[in-house]
Image (spheres, rainbow, N blue to C red):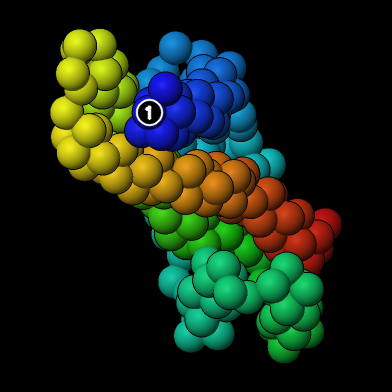
């Protein structure tokens, strides 16, 4: 049997195993939504009312420069939760008479910014998933074409080599994207956890 045939069959089997394995794991997490490849449950938008237990006034209170600055800092993901707690404690110490509604609107500012950022990430995951589906279809089509070429009585091995090179490249891209999926899928959950934590920290400062 020509080396081209052996090489082709090994590459096809290896690639099929990798992609089918990834696809099975993905399908188990999609719940029939092709734009959501994550294991985590898809929650497109968070609810402010579920994270802040005190009803906010319809009119936004006038926030001091310090209160506005605190809200902006809490919305930055680069600020750790430990630093966020320290910033909130410093604000509470400097402004001991801050009413509950001000704390609520500080949280609302941070919530709105982080929830918007989270929604954009979820949209990006959807676009990512569709690209993966399209790439998988392209890989499948290339495999079928290789099968057709190899089925001929006199296969065109030059054509097989070109197809194999394209397959190798596309499969590498597919695998690299899949590796980054775990981190990307965790990001919306981490933002949700951050908001819950910040809400608790701010609410703890409210004086009864």
Q: Where's residue 87, x and y in %?
A: 70, 80
Q: Mark 1: few, some, or many residues within 10 Å (few <14, many ≥20)?
A: few
Q: Where's residue 42, x and y in %?
A: 51, 28
Q: Which residue is label 1 attached to?
A: 2
Q: What's the residue at 78%, 73% (across, down)?
A: 82
Number of marks: 1
Q: Is residue 97 above or below residue 172?
A: below
Query: For this view, does 9 lie left or right of residue 81?
Result: left
**Quadrant into which the N terminus falls:** top left
Q: What's the residue at 41%, 34% (across, down)?
A: 3
**Quadrant into which the C terminus falls:** bottom right
Name the outermost residue toward the front. 1
Q: Is residue 176 above or below residue 24?
A: below
Query: For this view, does 85 lie left or right of residue 153?
Result: right
**Of residues 61 and 177, the one drawn nearer to the viewer in this rendering:** 177
**Of residues 166 and 104, the one drawn nearer to the viewer in this rendering:** 166
Q: What's the residue at 26%, 23% (across, down)?
A: 146
Res 8 seen here: no
Circle 1 — which element?
loop
Query: For this view, does 103 lie left or right of residue 83?
Result: left
**Of residues 10 and 93, the one drawn nearer to the viewer in this rendering:** 10
Q: Where's residue 37, x and y in %?
A: 48, 29
Query: In terms of image quadrants, where is residue 136?
Result: top left
Res 180 seen here: yes
Query: In terms of image quadrants, where is residue 9?
Result: top left
Q: What's the residue at 64%, 51% (across, down)?
A: 190
**Of residues 171 and 164, the one drawn nearer to the viewer in this rendering:** 164
């Amino acid at each position: 049997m020509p080396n081209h045939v052996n090489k082709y069959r090994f590459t096809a089997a290896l690639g099929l195993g990798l992609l089918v394995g990834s696809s099975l794991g993905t399908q188990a997490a999609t719940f029939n939504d092709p734009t959501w490849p994550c294991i985590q449950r898809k929650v497109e938008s968070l609810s402010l009312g579920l994270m802040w237990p005190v009803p906010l006034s319809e009119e936004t209170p006038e926030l001091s420069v310090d209160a506005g600055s605190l809200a902006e800092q809490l919305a930055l993901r680069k600020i750790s939760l430990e630093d966020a707690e320290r910033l909130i404690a410093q604000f509470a110490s400097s402004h001991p008479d801050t009413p509950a509604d001000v704390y609520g609107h500080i949280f609302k500012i941070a919530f709105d910014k982080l929830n918007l950022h989270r929604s954009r990430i979820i949209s990006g995951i959807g676009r990512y998933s569709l690209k993966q589906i399209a790439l998988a279809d392209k890989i499948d089509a290339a495999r079928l074409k290789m099968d057709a070429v190899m089925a001929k009585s006199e296969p065109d091995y030059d054509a097989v080599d070109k197809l194999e090179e394209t397959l190798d490249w596309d499969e590498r891209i597919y695998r690299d994207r899949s590796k980054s999926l775990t981190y990307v899928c965790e990001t919306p959950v981490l933002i949700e956890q951050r908001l819950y934590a910040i809400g608790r920290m701010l609410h703890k400062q409210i004086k009864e």
